[in-house]
Image (cartoon, rainbow, N blue to C red):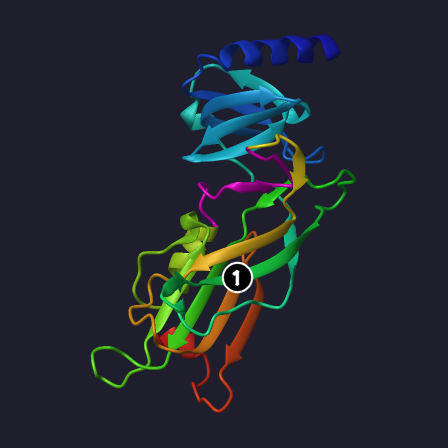
Amino acid sequence: MKLYRFFLFATIACMALTLSAGTIVYRPNKDAEPRRISNVKIISIENKVMTIEVDGGRERLALSQIEGYYDTDIKNAADGFDDNSPEYTVSVRPIKAPTRAQRKVGDKTTNETFDIEYSIQPVPNKGEKRDTESVKYPYVYVYIMTEYSEDGSGQRPIYLTSWPKAASISKKAYDKAAIMEKVLSSKRANLYKYQATSTTKLMTSTWDRKDELPLTMIRNKNAKILAWHVEIWGKSDIIYQEDWTEPGVRVGKNWWQRL
């Protein structure tokens, strides 16, 4: 078996340079049945981990999970990729929300951002003892209500900003289904616990995060922010929500759904 796996990995390593579409057989975990992924492109093999492109997204597999390999795309034999990344929770620090989209000090005007700092706590899959290496990238959505509209209608406009860029939806109305489509997409990237910085190449933990959401979508930059609603989506569902309303202001229940 050891000799077989040696030749298997050697073959995969050689084919990684030329493979455009192939099929990989692997086990999501040691107790699972083997699964087949077709139309796979091998991106890299490093530190006993293979990075692959499948269905337009990138995934990583430990070489120890791989049972077999074919250098052709066996479409009729494909099970698809089983996302075995863990669920996780977040601990959010006090949110730093601006009062307006722009801040003016003297003659200088600065565009503000909506800043959220949080820590990620992965929930290991059952039976896993090793530290979690990656989770699905947290998707953050913030709904913001400002005090008045420029069109003179007297309506309080509601805006949506999100992070990262891949989380953005094009709908101009509240649409939870569109968000779930983004969250569950195979193109959703993984966030890895350690990554090299571009300047020092040192390994730094990314479990502690600070997301700065732009407020460029707010048309009247001088309008006061009256309320906001934050949603952080984990692997498949909302894992954190928080609301704030300016004291003395009435906004109604679930006001952000009027977007």
Q: Which type of secondary structure does the marked residue at label 1 adopt?
A: strand
x 56%, y 51%: residue: 235
Predominant SS along the magenta part: loop
The answer to which of 186 and 215 lies nearer the viewer is 215
Horizontal side of 149 relative to 238 (left or right) equals left
Asked whether residue 190 is drawn in magenta, I would say yes
Horizontal side of 211 relative to 250 (left or right) equals right
Asked whether residue 128 is drawn in magenta, I would say no
Horizontal side of 18 relative to 234 (left or right) equals left
Name above or below for residue 105 compared with residue 180: below
Quarter of the rendering occupied by the N terminus: top right
Disc 1 residue type?
Asp
Quarter of the rendering occupied by the C terminus: bottom left
Name above or below for residue 259 compared with residue 237: below
x 72%, y 47%: residue: 124
Image location (x, y in percent) of residue 233: 53, 58
Q: Which residues are magenta?
A: 184-198
Residue closest to the far bottom? 248
x 60%, y 45%: residue: 135
Image location (x, y in percent) of residue 153: 22, 84
